[in-house]
Amino acid sequence: MSENLLEIRGLHKSYGNVEVLKGVDCTMKQGDVVSIIGSSGSGKTTMLRCINMLEEFQGGSISIDGEEIGYEMAGAQRRRKREKEIARQRALTGMAFQQFNLFPHMSAVGNVMLGLVKVKKMEKDAARTVSEKWLDRVGLLSRADHFPGQLSGGQQQRVAIARAIAMNPRLMLFDEVTSALDPELVNEVLQVIKSLAQDGMSMLLVTHEMRFAYEVSNRVIFMNQGLIGEEGNPRDMFHKPKSERLAEFLKTSSFA
Amino acid sequence: MDMAHFLDVLWLARWPILKGIGVTLSISFLAICCGTVLGVFVGLALTYSKAPLRWIVRGYTDFIRGTPVLVLVLASYYVLGTVGLDLGPFQAGILALAVFCSSHVGEIVRGALQAIPKGQTEAAKAIGLTFPQTFAYVLGPQALRQVVPAWVNTAAEMVKASTLLSIIGVAELLLRTQELISRTFMSLEFYFFAGFLYFIINYAIERLGRYVERKIMVPS
């Protein structure tokens, strides 16, 4: 087995006749913080969603800690793993969504506890302790008993991050987590992510916040038309782009 | 209209009326309960099942919803007998009402489940919940909040539809009332009184629904 935390080989994904990912290769090591940038429709989000099987993919492989995600070979036939197995594998990664997707009928702490109690089979008291620890970490312990409808967008997103990370995932996936937020709420969420990165959490972020990608990540991937257009450390990527496409993209983006 | 006289007659007729109320309540209760349980499965099948089963269930609901309840009642009493399923009027009536109820509840449940944003299922999957768990803790409770108001409406419809069982000779409140009228000729008074009793029953259901809605309301 490899020492890579995440290993994506030749990832292909189509919606009907439209090929969205055309053979993506990507590896991450423990503790890496990787940002994926690129124009909309380039396949960034789709790639992220394949990693936890929210999207099926038709070719290639994804593995986490050497464990193949989602599909297995039965002889020469590639087939989807059993739902229970996929559910277990999904918990290897944590995901934060653009639209937060908090469960509206549960309090903040209830949202964080659900996975701990039902998936990790923790006792309620223990789960509550862990949940409160994480809510405290994102600065929302005082809002533990509030419902999502009583929280601001930024607060909801921080609860959603706590909910994902409390499951102790190997890798955190952030899917444009600040895109739906009012500008003045973006920073509080980015601060939380940054502090998690400093703690050594491995993460893969799809983002439009170029300045943030530059500051937080140790590697940046530029996706272009379903392929990785260019990748490297943030300094080179943002200041000395090799490809024309990336240079063009950076010009139109907010990075200055 | 002589009020004192009517009250006298009403007092004498109290037992048949009470029995009628009892029958109406038990028909409604059984039909609503059976219809709701069946309807939840219908709704689940409409939302989540794969092609052949879904078409069958879709056909069932469309057919039942497009048929007058009275026709269902008559069919269940007279037609089922010809294929060997001989039910008494009470059972046949409840069967017809429950089937009718299930098709409506099925649509209500389907609508409520489909109204839940896809992101809810995705978030549940992302923390590693299996589908049954997702349904039990995430989708079901949210659907329930949508279902209650429409369900109360259907329950009230079922109480009203129970009057149709008088046609096949079930001695529920309306049939008892008609019997009293044919003896006393006080049609205006007794019809009015029966109407009032139906109103009380439905008003109670509506209050109960409001109470449940308030209980499960999500703070915002």
Image: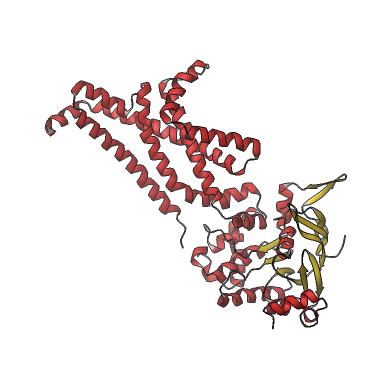
Foreground pick, B65 / A168 = B65
> Could you tell me residue B55's position as x and y percent?
61, 36
- Looking at the picture, tell me which residue is in the foreground, B202 or A116: B202
Examine the rendered structure and indicate whether residue B146 appears above or below residue A197: above
Q: In the rendered view, would you say B64 is above or below A86? A: above
Q: Residue at x 62, y 63 (%)?
A: A163
The x, y position of residue A173, in whole percent, is 70, 65
Quadrant holding the C terminus of chain A: bottom right
Q: Number of callouts in the render?
A: 0
Residue A64 seen by the camera? no
- Colouring scheme applied when the structure was drawn: secondary structure
Q: Residue at x 57, y 76 (%)?
A: A183
Q: Position of residue A227 (x, y in %)?
A: 80, 65
Q: Is residue A75 left or right of residue B55?
A: right
State the residue in front, B206 or B72. B72
What residue sits 73% from the left and 69% below the top? A203
Relative side of B9 to B51, left or right: left
Residue A24, visible in the rendered structure:
yes
Quarter of the image with the N terminus of chain A in it:
bottom right
Q: Along the horizontal axis of the image, is B99 left or right of A195?
A: left
Answer with the quarter of the image where residue A215 lies: bottom right
Give residue A101's quadrant in the image: bottom right
Using the image, determine if residue B159 lies above or below residue A56: above
Name the one closer to the observer, A240 or A16: A16
Residue B114 in the image: x percent, y percent?
56, 49
Residue at image x 51%, y 32%? B63
Question: Could you say which quadrant of the image residue B88 lies in?
Answer: top left
